[in-house]
Amino acid sequence: MPIEKTLILIKPDGMQRRLAGLAIDRLDNAGFELIGAKVVSVTDELAHEHYALLKGQSYFEKAVKFIRGDYHNVSNRRVLALAYRGENAIKGVRAVVGATSPEESLPGTIRSAFGRINSKEGYYENVVHASGNAMEAGRELKIWFKPGDLVE
């Protein structure tokens, strides 16, 4: 089985609700190795770079505003960027995280336990982002972490 690295972000809704420790606990207990962590102030440029693959989608600007903390009044627009490593880490982390929609997430996943749907504003508060595949993981890790930031 391949050893992979992947990115997880504790998004502004998770930071506002102080869920970072609970999410980390679930990831650590799933057997993945934490190799990088930092609190990042999300600029407009960083948000656009992170969601560049979604450009042209109807929800692109909403996703940018969300990750910047515009909906949650998170001080300094902060998120917690995490890098994990392990066997089949990308698929495994996504299993711990759950489906994008909290309603569709399996019981016991981070999004099932802590996510919610904001029907008034029309978006998911799903607490975390996790890279979807190896290409995304490589691209996203380079966006959020500088060379030498990860302990490998």
Image (cartoon, helix red, strand yellow):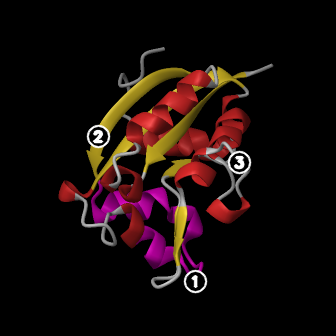
**Principal SS element in the magenta part?**
helix
- Measured along the vertical axis of the image, is residue 88 above or below residue 74? above
Task: Sort mark 1 into few (<14), some (14-19) or many (20+) by Cα contacts within 10 Å.
Answer: few
Q: Which residue is mark 2?
A: 39
* Mark earlier in primary sequence (1, 3): 1
Locate residue 5, reporting x and y percent: 59, 29
Find the distance from the CA under tag 1 to the CA under tag 3: 29 Å
Q: Which residue is mark 3?
A: 107
In this rendering, position of residue 70 left or right of residue 14: left
- Measured along the vertical axis of the image, is residue 86 above or below residue 38? above
Q: Amino acid at mark 3?
A: Pro
Q: Nearer the viewer, residue 114 or 77?
A: 114
Describe the element under mark 3 as helix, strand or loop. loop
Residue 109, picture quadrant: top right
Residue visible at 51% across and 45% down in the picture: 140
Q: Is residue 11 magenta?
A: no
Q: What residue range appears in magenta?
A: 42-64
Residue 42, picture quadrant: bottom left
Task: Sort mark 2 into few (<14), some (14-19) or many (20+) by Cα contacts within 10 Å.
Answer: few
Nearer the observer, disc 2 or disc 3?
Answer: 3
Nearer the observer, disc 1 or disc 3?
Answer: 3
Find the distance from the CA under tag 1 to the CA under tag 2: 29 Å
Give the label on residue 122, or none: none
Q: Is residue 44 magenta?
A: yes
Nearer the observer, disc 1 or disc 2?
Answer: 2
Q: Amino acid at mark 2?
A: Val
Residue 70 in sight in this render? yes
Locate residue 130, reporting x and y percent: 57, 46
Locate residue 89, reporting x and y percent: 67, 29
Residue 101 in sight in this render? no
Residue 47, picture quadrant: bottom left
Find the distance from the CA under tag 2 to the CA under tag 3: 28 Å
